[in-house]
Image: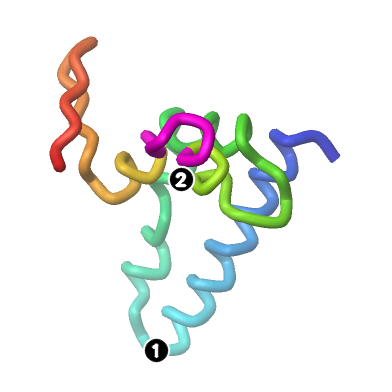
Amino acid sequence: MNKFWGHLKTITHHRHLVMRGCFRMGLIWQGLTHDLSKYSPTEFFAGVRYFQGSRSPNTAEREANGYSLAWMHHKGRLFCCGRTMTICI
């Protein structure tokens, strides 16, 4: 299975597990919106690039670069204004 489909399958499976748990607790909106940012180009394509199938691609990106743009984007620490990116620490 190539990295694109492997990563897509992994994040979709995770999202469905979280949705099921949220729905059982009555947290409908949280279940529907959980981790939607993982499908954004910033997070998804970094995930595909560093996908290994056995651990988080964010860890592999962090090891390769010293930081993970995908993780910072996911946590809301990366703000894009046109072509300018500011990383807030």
* Magenta-drawn stretch, dominant element (helix, strand or loop): helix
Q: Which residue appears at 73% of the width and 51% of the height?
A: 53
Q: Is residue 50 left or right of residue 70?
A: right
The quarter of the rendered structure image containing the N terminus is top right
Mark 1 vs 2, N-terminal side:
1
Residue beneath the point at 52% across and 48% down: 59
Disc 1 marks which amino acid?
Met
Query: SS of the residue at dot 2?
Result: helix
- The residue that disc 2 covers is 38
Label drawn at residue 25? 1
Q: Please give the label number shown on residue 57.
A: none
Q: Nearer the viewer, residue 3 or 5?
A: 3
3 versus 28 height, above or below: above
Q: Quadrant of the C terminus?
A: top left
Q: Secondary structure at mark 1?
A: loop
Q: Position of residue 7 (x, y in %)?
A: 66, 44
Three-letter amino acid code at the position of disc 2:
Lys
Question: What segment is highlighted magenta in the picture?
Answer: 62-69
Q: Residue at x 31, y 40 (%)?
A: 73
Q: Around disc 1, counting alpha carbons within 10 Å, would you say few (fewer than 14), some (14 to 19), or many (20 or more)?
A: few
